[in-house]
Amino acid sequence: MMDKPLYIHRFRYHFSITKLIFWALIFLCLIYFFFCQAPSSSSTSTLTSRRVLWGGPDWESRVLKSARPRSRAGGHVVLVTGAAGFVGTHVSAALRRRGDGVLGLDNFNGYYDPSLKRSRASLLERAGVFVVEGDINDAKLLKKLFGLVKFSHVMHLAAQAGVRYAMKNPGSYVNSNIAGFVNLLEVCKSANPQPAIIWASSSSVYGLNTKIPFSEKDRTDQPSSLYAATKKAGEEIAHTYNHIYGLSITGLRFFTVYGPWGRPDMAYFFFTKDILKRKTITIFEGPNHSTVARDFTYIDDIVKGCLAALDTAKKSTGTGGKKKGVAQLRVFNLGNTSPVPVGKLVSILEKLLKVKAKKVVLPMPANGDVLFTHANVSLAQRELGYKPTTDLQMGLKKFVRWQAVMKYSYDKRYAKAVSGPRFECDKGSFELRFPITMVFNFFGKLFSLVFDGWSWWWDRITEDNVIRVLTTVLATTLIISWCAWLIKKSRTPPLPPGPPGLPVLGNLPFIEPDFHRYFTKLSQIYGPIVKLKLGSKICIVITSPSLAKQVLKDQDAVFANRDPPASALITSYGKHDIVWMPNGPEWRQLRKIFVRDMMSSSILDACYGLRRQEVREMVREVYKQVGLPINIGEQIFLTILNVVMNMLWGGSLHGEDRRIVGVEFRQVVGEIVEMLGKPNISDLFPVLARLDLQGIKSNTKKLVSWFDRIFDSVIAHRMDVDVANESETKKENKEIKDFLQFLLDLKNQGDSKTSLSTTQIKGLLLDIVLGGSDTTSTSLEWAIAEILNNLEIMRKVQEELDEVVGNDSIVEESHIPKLHYLNTVLKETFTHLSLS
């Protein structure tokens, strides 16, 4: 036996030091993102799945699952709009915790950083609430949701918030707070049954009202801002729909809501951030140095009010858009009843953060803000049992504690506030805080992930010490890796020469699109055998005929195995087919079965009539469409598919099924072939295979499952028929069997050496369907296109056909050996096809 040349190696996963470097980089990146970065809004499979367009079985399944009540008999089914907003997130989580079915809806607009909203949505998803990404102005989406789910309540919290922003973008307030509200009410009034509606109004509707405290009976016809005007318009619109259509509607006027997961545009939120960053904060005062005060209300108190309003809401009295009785219409103030000056808010934050704020006091600009808010909640107390229990001191303490765990704004002063013990010395003081802070952060995040289910996010890091440590660790890792690589290189058997590459990536960035020209260029530099490193894989390129002969013929057994891509592992049912199965007894058995029982002369001769019939059927279909555009590739595919299916399991497609099912068959086959040929980063970096970054693995599984259902159905049907006709089968054992019948006989009757599993049967069937239909039809379609584009060649082909076949005859298989010119044209076409 001939010895293997020095540089001939089987294609294999190369455990080089690059793998160590790669893992080191991955580890450091994880550390960096854990301690220095917020999770990207586009990362993780849950965010990806959240952004998919609405519709489809998977989407509908998630909607129905989220809206299904659990653990609470007679639980409500609630649609929460603005579910990824501040109040919406807390209300949705509270409803789900007590067992109600909750479906969220949010458009994730850019009024403030959408990553915060997506973090909230991620939190809700872990709690079992699916947040549909869509707009309340999308009537089609709302109708789809109401068609899938019979909502008992709608908690409408979606709105364009903020008083000052209305001066920059007034249209967004009209679009969301008025048009969006009307669109939602239109869908609700047409629903059957109509849901009860609880919606978020605002304390801003009191506008220029000077009567204190604000009561629901006070006048609200003097709005001081466009935001207030749209909320007031919403209350009037709610009254109209209640009066005309019988919708049960409850409006809730929120008073300055604050707390964890709040809005970054709120004063308490950006004051905290700016104080920690030693930035100057602006405190406004009214005319004649009057105090600006707000009735700050903690989020937990607001949530209790929302749930009480929902639980006491009566059913709507209309159905299908028609009112059948007087419906409930209510408006409640939800506040804390204790206005606090903004200056006191800042003082509380200074104590909690242990940082003195840099303040500047300026007159309040004419931007729509009011000087004072104060809620009278006696009506809510009487009818809802509403009673706020959290004062501003306690509420801000909870907010700051939340920020400590979530690390929204990490800097030196903040680190000192949450962890850093100080040590005094003669020349001043210093803080030993970094290691303790890191430990605190790690266990804080671990605790909140496991026990609270909260996700974390924060601004870009500004702590120089962290960056220095990470840089040191990275540099040390690279140096150790380099030394280890040098040591291992001296012990590694020599590989063929090849172009230099980059760490981790190898030669990937330098490969040119025209492979044959690129490989020729490399062979001129490095010789007939060249090494390329593609990610984690070592590939050997052979350009010499003599070396190719050694690989493909002399050493065929050594190089017979293939390294399947991720998609091929799925289409081959885990390398259980004839294409990807490793060289060995099982593969040789499959090949023997295929050659002897599928491609034998007797089988091919027996199917001659079938092939002749299908070709003539195709000719008739083409003839019917003379003068019209025709998809010749589709016709060829359907013809070949019928022949293959008939040979495999005795079935074929005719009439309308031939067109409808055949087109779907071709589409699925084409997509599988595309998945098999698509470059996949998981094939080059196996450590990333589980992540399925390009979705190739999941898409291939869906496509193969389509074939799986067909194969399972055909096999089950055939086995049922065999059991029913077992006695007749024994009498007619000389009858010619189709290929599937032969395979099932081997499975049921074969010994340990010749028996087949169901998986192997399906793998072999899929090989034949894919290889026999797509490859052949594509090649023939290409050949016909090439002939049509070259009139001279087409003329010669026609002349040869006239001479061999005649004008009045149809081509038979016996004519093919005599069509020398046509055979040459096809061979030349296949050569160009393979190069392209």
Image (spheres, rainbow, N blue to C red):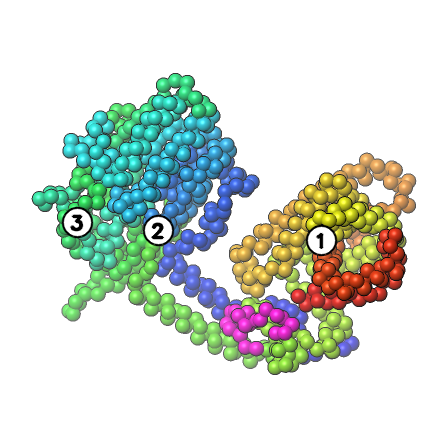
Question: Picture coordinates of residue 762 (x, y %)?
Answer: 72, 50
Q: In this view, does 434 lie to the left or right of 517?
A: left
Indicate whether residue 513 is drawn in magenta.
yes
View extreme (left): residue: 288
At a point 36% along the width and 60% down the height, the residue shown is: 36
Question: Picture coordinates of residue 803 (x, y %)?
Answer: 88, 61
Determine whether label 3 and label 1 are within 8 Å by CB. no
Q: Given this view, does label 2 or label 1 mark the residue nearer the observer?
A: 1
User: Which corner quadrant of the image does residue 430 belong to?
Assistant: bottom left
Tag 3: residue type? Ile
Tag 1: residue type? Gly
User: Which corner quadrant of the image does residue 788 belong to?
Assistant: bottom right
Question: Picture coordinates of residue 452 (x, y %)?
Answer: 38, 45
For mark 3, what is the residue?
A: 283
Label 1 Cα crowd, 10 Å radius (few <14 / some 14-19 / many 20+): many
| Mark nearer the N terminus (3 vs 1) | 3
Indicate whether residue 706 is drawn in magenta.
no
